[in-house]
Amino acid sequence: NQGQKTGFYITLDTPDMRYTHGSEIDAVFAENRDIQLLEGAGISTYPLDISFFEPRVYNGLIEYDVAPWPTAMPSTPPSENPTVSPTASPTGSPTAPPTLSPVTSPPTIMDSAVPSPPPTENTTTPPTTPERAVPGGNPPKSDAGSQP
């Protein structure tokens, strides 16, 4: 982007880097209509050291491409109407895949604020959890000959 400054680090594992002494850090040493190259610093030891030599001018080739800006528009304009109409009735499949974790808290066993109605006298099966019967209540009656 115009006015944006970007630095880069060039390294070799041999002492073959070519540079010349510059005049001032951030002084323009080369430019064209696309880019400005500024004077910077050299580092004394490979791969990276805290000793800097400045100002330095890199004596090498820098290749780059300029992307069109702004980017090209789409080849066709967007349509005014949606390309897929909604269906008259829901589909049989979900619209999003199920998640691996629940989105609600697990159920808890607590007394409710409103008591449940009492059991009916004509039950057809015995209770499956007699330990959860109401304290002091009578167990439900069952017919010995009936089947569930």
Image: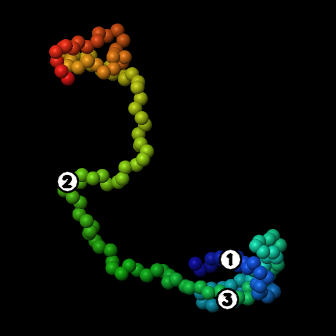
Horizontally, residue 145 falls left or right of residue 109, namely: left
Q: Which residue is mark 3?
A: 61
- Horizontal and vertical percent position of residue 23: 80, 86
Q: Residues within 10 Å of mark 2 (few under 14, many from 20)?
A: few
Q: Residue at x 68, y 85 (%)?
A: 37
Comparing labels 2 and 3, the label whose residue is closer to the camera = 3
- Which element carries disc 3, helix, strand or loop? loop
Looking at marks 2 and 3 on the same chain, the residue that comes earlier in the sequence is marked by 3
Q: Residue at x 23, y 54 (%)?
A: 91
Horizontally, residue 115 falls left or right of residue 106, namely: left
Kind of residue at badge 2: Ser
Dot 3 and dot 1 residues touching (CB under 8 Å): no
Q: Residues within 10 Å of mark 3 (few under 14, many from 20)?
A: few
Q: Quadrant of residue 123?
A: top left
Kind of residue at badge 3: Leu
Q: CA distance from mark 3 to mark 1?
A: 14 Å
Looking at marks 3 and 1 on the same chain, the residue that comes earlier in the sequence is marked by 1
Q: Which residue is mark 1?
A: 8
Horizontally, residue 85 falls left or right of residue 50, namely: left
Total numbered badges shown on the rendered structure? 3
Instruction: State the residue lying farthest toward the left.
Output: 145
Q: Residue at x 73, y 88 (%)?
A: 59
Dot 2 and dot 3 residues touching (CB under 8 Å): no
Q: Which residue is mark 2?
A: 89
Kind of residue at badge 1: Phe
Q: Residues within 10 Å of mark 1 (few under 14, many from 20)?
A: few
